Amino acid sequence: MLIRCQLVLAFLLITVSVSTFARSNEPVTHDIQVRLEPDRQLITVRDLISLPRNADRITLHLHAGLGPVFSSPDGDVTQELVSISHSIETWQVTLPENSRTLLVNYSGYLKQSLGS
C-alpha cells in the first residue's frame, strides 16, 4: 500500500514553474501535509510553498478535480485557470507584492484504490 500511495502522491503533487527562478539560485521549497483516507479514497493536502526572492508570479500544474484554493499570509492572490489537458490543470497565480509564500489547499476523491 505504501508504494501505491507514493505513486499516487507523485501524480497529485504540484509542479511549480517560477518566472524568476532562472535568475535565482534559491530553491522552491514545499512544506506538505497530506491526509489519506484509503477507505473513502480521499486525499487532502496543505502545501506551503516558499519561493525565491522576486518571484511574483508562478505557474502550477495539478491533477484536475482537486479544487485548489490559493492564499498568501501577505495579502490577496490572483489566480487563473490557464488550461486543462490530460487530467492536468495549469494555474497562473500572482502573489502580493514582496510576498514569497503561497499556501495551496486541495482535496478530492481518487479514482484508483489505495487499498492493498
Image (tube, helix red, strand yellow):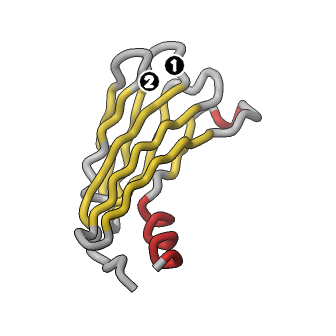
Placement of 114 over or under 70, stated as above or below = below
Secondary structure, mark 1, is loop
Which residue has dot 1 on it?
A: 99
Count residues near mark 2 (Cα–Cα under 10 Å), then give few for <14, some for 14-19, many for 20+. Answer: many
State the image coordinates of residue 55 (x, y, percent, origin top left).
57, 27
Quarter holding residue 104: top left
Residue type at the position of mark 1: Ser
Tell me how far mark 2 sits from mark 1, CA to CA.
Answer: 6 Å
With 60 as the anchor, is 71 left or right in this view?
left
Q: How many marks?
A: 2
Along the line of sight, the residue nearer the viewer: 68 or 90: 68
- Residue plotted at (50% across, 75% down): 2
With 112 as the anchor, is 17 left or right in this view?
right
Q: Are marks 2 and 1 in contact (CB under 8 Å)?
A: yes
Residue type at the position of mark 2: Leu
- Residue plotted at (31% across, 65% down): 37
- Residue plotted at (26% across, 58% down): 108
Secondary structure, mark 2, is loop
Count residues near mark 1 (Cα–Cα under 10 Å), then give few for <14, some for 14-19, many for 20+. Answer: many
- Residue plotted at (51% across, 27% down): 101
Quarter holding residue 25: top right
State the image coordinates of residue 41 (x, y, percent, origin top left).
27, 70
Which residue has dot 2 on it?
A: 95
Along the line of sight, the residue nearer the viewer: 60 or 41: 41
State the image coordinates of residue 48 (x, y, percent, origin top left).
49, 37
Tell me the quarter of the image containing the C terminus: bottom left
Along the line of sight, the residue nearer the viewer: 80 or 63: 63
Placement of 71 over or under 7, stated as above or below = above
Placement of 63 over or under 4, stated as above or below = above
State the image coordinates of residue 32 (x, y, percent, origin top left).
50, 46
Quarter holding residue 92: top left
